[in-house]
């Protein structure tokens, strides 16, 4: 298994991996889990998939095993009447139809030292999700980031703990028609304490 970090447009030569990741998201979130998300040309794609996003993708050759999207929380997307920031903040502020706005106790931060990881997806029976988190932590260290925010099923918090992270809940477990999920944060680990 190989892990590739892709920052567009600089790494456009690796766009085939990003496309494969978007295809995997479509298969898992739309086909298997029946989430009501936007699908375009067999891809699950949304407003946060921009050149501001960083993709962490685990693959064996061209086969995508897992991936996730990172965004700095000081991101601003769009120029019209509706501007987006990042998923947790936009949900908290009531800008995402169908997403609970009570997923955080306090207003989520906007900072270049705080990033958000979302859309983590992994093929079953692989260790690939852990590799995504491991490489995401390494990437965030290189950016001098302090914290990473997550929006994921509650089991994901337990996975983060098992790897040596110290997750802190940002709010209650909430749900919608797509299932139950939790917003939480982890400090970026600057020592060799993260275990795959």
Image (cartoon, helix red, strand yellow):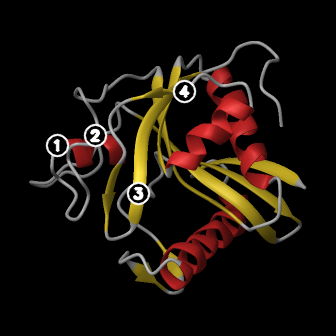
Q: Residue at x 77, y 26 (%)?
A: 194
Frontmost residue, 68 versus 49: 68
The answer to whether the residues at label 3 and label 1 have Cβ atoms under 8 Å apart is no
Residue positioned most to the left? 81
Determine whether the residue tagged by mark 2 lies in a helix, strand or loop. Answer: helix
Q: Can residue 69 be seen in this view?
A: yes
- Quadrant of res 188: top right
Closer to viewer: mark 2 or mark 4: 4
Closer to viewer: mark 3 or mark 1: 3
For the N terminus, the quadrant is bottom right
Q: Mark 4 points at which residue?
A: 167
On screen, 131 above or below 134? below
Q: Which residue is drawn at 87% across and 52% down?
A: 2
The answer to whether the residues at label 2 and label 1 have Cβ atoms under 8 Å apart is yes
- Quadrant of res 61: bottom right
Label 1 crowd (10 A; few <14 / some 14-19 / many >=20): some
Residue 61 marker: none
Q: Mark 1 points at which residue?
A: 93
Determine whether the residue tagged by mark 3 lies in a helix, strand or loop. Answer: strand
Residue 90, x across and y down, in percent: 25, 46
Residue 180 marker: 3
Closer to viewer: mark 4 or mark 1: 4
Residue 195, x across and y down, in percent: 82, 30
Q: Which of marks 4 and 3 is nearer the N terminus?
A: 4
Q: Mark 2 points at which residue?
A: 89
Q: Earlier in the sequence, mark 2 or mark 4?
A: 2
Q: Earlier in the sequence, mark 3 or mark 2?
A: 2
CA gap, disc 4 to disc 1?
23 Å
CA gap, disc 4 to disc 3?
17 Å
CA gap, disc 3 to disc 1?
19 Å
Label 2 crowd (10 A; few <14 / some 14-19 / many >=20): many
């Amino acid at each position: 298994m190989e892990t590739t970090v892709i920052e567009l447009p600089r790494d456009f030569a690796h766009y085939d991996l990003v496309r494969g990741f978007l295809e995997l998201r479509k298969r898992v979130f739309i086909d298997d889990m029946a989430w009501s998300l936007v699908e375009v040309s067999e891809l699950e794609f949304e407003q946060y998939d921009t050149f501001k996003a960083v993709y962490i993708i685990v693959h064996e050759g061209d086969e995508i095993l897992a991936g996730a999207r990172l965004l700095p929380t000081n991101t601003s997307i769009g120029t019209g009447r509706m501007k987006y920031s990042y998923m947790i903040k936009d949900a908290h502020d009531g800008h995402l139809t169908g997403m609970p706005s009570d997923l955080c106790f306090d207003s989520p931060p906007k900072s270049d030292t705080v990033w958000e990881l979302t859309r983590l997806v992994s093929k079953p029976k692989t260790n690939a999700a852990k590799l995504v988190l491991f490489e995401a932590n390494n990437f965030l260290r290189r950016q001098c980031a302090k914290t990473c925010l997550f929006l994921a099923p509650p089991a994901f918090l337990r996975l983060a703990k098992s790897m040596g992270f110290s997750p802190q809940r940002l709010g209650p477990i909430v749900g919608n028609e797509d299932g139950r999920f939790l917003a939480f944060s982890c400090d970026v680990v600057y020592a060799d304490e993260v275990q795959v």
